[in-house]
Amino acid sequence: MAESQLSPVRKGAMKRDRRDLVGLAYVAPVMLVLLVVLILPAIFAVYYSLLELQSVRPIGFAGLDNYRRVFSDPQMVEVVLRTLGFAVVTVALTLTVALAVAVFLDRLTTGRATFVQILVILPWVISTIVGALLFRWFFVTDISPGVYFLSLVGIHVKPLTDPTLAMMTLILVAMWRTLGFAVLLLLAGIKAVPAEFYEAAKIDGATSRQQFRLITLPMIKTPLTITTVVLTMSNLNNVEAPLVTTGGGPGDATQILPLTIYQQAFTHFDFSGGAALAAVALLLNVGLVFAYLRLAKWSV
């Protein structure tokens, strides 16, 4: 049957089908990359966590023995709790600082705002390893410029030898690394808020704080939620910062789950145990993301 003889309803359905196919063609390359880079490795990690491995060669089915073995270590529960605390505190601090910086940038002129944005985004665009090494060299080591300048004003600190300072340093490294991403995403959301809303609020006598609470925050709920989810996943999988900055020390003060997975697989060559911990990290990622979306009750 010729297309001209079809009913208007049928023509509309065919157009929608063609539009959907075109949309799928556009997103197919991205979905393929996600499948190869993210989804398949996650599936293989769960699969290998159920096997008994000799080096990387499966020699039998282990079931849940790998999970029982790695979690029989009493320190593993502390590692998981420390990881959750690290992620929650880092995300909260990063969002707070990023939101303040984004509001500040929104009020600057174009030239000044561009200069500040470049400074903020630099830690995000450089290599994570390089960024962590620079942070360690400038702020953390005993002969670093940061420690030296603090000693000049009578503040004598050694972050790598104090458990509390070491964890604070790790949180600062992670926040410094991801701050630029959060600022740009939140700033884009703030820029998208119609100026008419603020003008109407000023006419009604709303203060700047009330405008921020009643207009800005509700209007940027989508970028705020996306930023929270991305930062959570980034910090739950952050192995470079603790590996380069603190090495998990002093003692086990900064030993978090991603670093433990790395050491289990590539230092102790326990690939089945590392796969089991990676599967647990996957569940933590998915669980916390759903918890954020559920608690916020904000549609993305």
Image (cartoon, grey):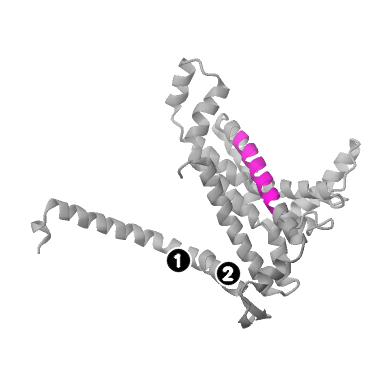
Mark 1: secondary structure: helix
Label 1 or label 2, whichever comes before in sequence order: 1
Q: In the drawing, does residue 26 fall left or right of residue 282?
A: left
Q: Are marks 1 and 2 in contact (CB under 8 Å)?
A: no
Q: Is residue 73 above or below residue 238?
A: below
Look at the image and give the residue range highlighted in magenta.
Answer: 83-100
> Is 58 part of what is drawn in magenta?
no
Q: Which residue is mark 1?
A: 32
Quadrant where the N terminus is found in the figure = bottom left
Residue drawn at (16%, 52%) of the image: 9
Gap in angstroms between the C-alphas marked 1 and 2: 20 Å
Circle 2 SS class:
helix
Residue type beneath disc 1: Leu
Is 50 located above or below residue 203 in the figure? Answer: below
In front: 59, or 140? 59
Judged left or right of residue 7, residue 234 is: right
Q: Residue at x 82, y 44 (%)?
A: 146
Q: Nearer the viewer, mark 1 or mark 2?
A: 2
Residue 295 image point, x, y percent: 54, 42
Q: Which of the pair 178/204 is nearer the observer?
A: 204
User: Residue beneath label 2, please?
Assistant: 46
The stretch drawn in magenta includes residue 94: yes
Task: Please identify the quarter of the rendering in which residue 252 is found.
Answer: bottom right
Vertical placement of residue 120 versus 12, above or below = above
Q: Residue at x 76, y 65 (%)?
A: 73
In the image: residue 131, left or right of residue 11: right
Q: Position of residue 107 (x, y in %)?
A: 56, 29
Q: Amino acid at mark 2?
A: Val
Q: What x and y, as percent, mark residue 284?
A: 61, 56
